[in-house]
Image (tube, rainbow, N blue to C red):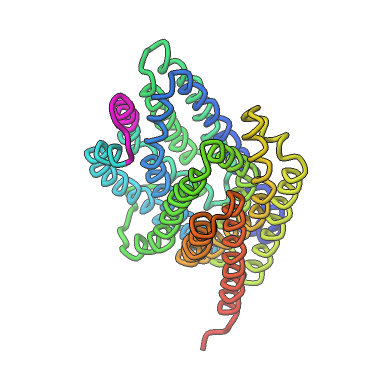
Amino acid sequence: MRDRLDEFIANPRRALFAMAGPVTIAMFVQTMYNLVDTAYVGRLGAESIAALTFAFPLFFIIIGLNSGIGVGINSIISRRLGAKDSDGAENAAVHGLVMTAVFGLALLAVGLPLQKRVFILLGAGGHVLELSMSYMSVIWLGIIFMFPAYAMNSIFSAQGDTRTPMIVQTSALILNAVLDPIFIYPLGFGVQGAAIATVIALAFSVVLYTFFIRRRSRLKVDFRRFRFSFSLCREICRVGAPASLMMLIMSVYVMFLNRFMAHFGTNHVAAFGLATRLESLPGMLIVGISVSLLTLVGMFYGARQLPMVESISWYGLRIGVAMTGLIGAVFFIAPALFLRIFTDEPQILALGASYLRIDVLTFPMMAVSMIVSRVLQGLGLGVPGLVINLVRIFVVAVPLAYLFVFILGYGFLSIAWAMVLGGAASNILALLWLRSTFKKRERPKP
């Protein structure tokens, strides 16, 4: 791994783009698949779409826990590799796989028996309840493949290899897209067929990852050399647990915004939903940059290359803000042009365009929050990212949106302005926290 670290140190900016590209491509493929999957299920009727809608919060909990553990694994492995501790990095990788297995089985044991109560609590009933349970029952069983797949993705990313995860994810998504209509229609499984196709694709991805770990990984993942370390588990959780909570908080945030929009009517909710979908474009770029920075910062920090940690972090921030700002400017100029991808309804287009012209201000703010969070996670600090998002959502955005809509009686665009103000507040906190952290790291120890 020393040659790769030297390569990254020699040209960190090139490394940033080389790693960000495959991540962005994989996210684009995932977004395209989600649209295709929704179209397949949509042909089954409104009840099937409603079933997936009710299943989404539970599915998001699974994804959130997976993502958080993955961030923790990436952070600790990259720092160990930067410190030239290959044995420690390999042991951390095995710990990550073991932890995902334990958490996955625990979540399966809790989630499967309780899912009916949760669906009823969310408002599902009748045939929709049956469809929701038939879908999620398969997804719960698929956890045994989903968790190790996420862990192995992080093991590769922590080594600076985002190309292999891109190949695996793209291959699995193509298989999923092929199997979806087969299980849904000819085989007659309906909405459950979509879940079966997803689980088969996840199992396929685990097989591919296992193959590539043996052939491509510079880390030797050998369970026979596993040495249990409570401190390693604690370190993964110290970074990963706040990252998981961040994902869960985002789902709650969207629920609040939907509730506020519903106050104005169905068309406003639809317009908000379509504008939010367009956020996936700048979001893909931000994730690509932030995941790359997580690895690079971890490696450079482990190698005690503190000036390089700072320079690549600020460079990544500038690139992220510039790219998302450019996308926002394009959306601002012609919002209806992009909204027409989803609908031709004149009222929804008008509402969505006016909302999007304000919402684009949050694009660069989203870049700052996410990139700063990943940089701090690369340094082994998981809590700051959680606090930054809590301030944005529950200290500023949600209270202001409630004040504007339900107390002051402002229009639906006030919700967008509440989001802008929340983003501004969180950005100020994020940048101050990042600068303070860098100064503390520069200060010589007594």
Residue 19 position, x and y percent, is 63, 48
Q: Quarter-wise, where is residue 343 in the image?
A: top right
- Res. 95 in view: yes
Give the residues drawn in magenta, as a range. Answer: 122-138
Residue sitting at 57 percent across and 58 percent down? Answer: 418
Residue sitting at 48 percent across and 43 percent down? Answer: 262
Q: How many marks?
A: 0
| Prevailing secondary structure class for the magenta stretch in the rendered image | helix
Q: Is residue 386 magenta?
A: no
- Res. 26 in view: no
Instruction: From the viewer's side, name the closer residue of 158 and 51.
Output: 51
Residue 220 position, x and y percent, is 44, 48
Name the image quarter holding the N terminus.
Answer: bottom right
Residue 37 position, x and y percent, is 50, 26
Q: Is residue 130 magenta?
A: yes
Considering every residue shown, the one lying at the far bottom of the view is 446
Q: Quarter-wise, where is residue 330 in the image?
A: top right
Residue sitting at 37 percent across and 13 percent down? Answer: 188
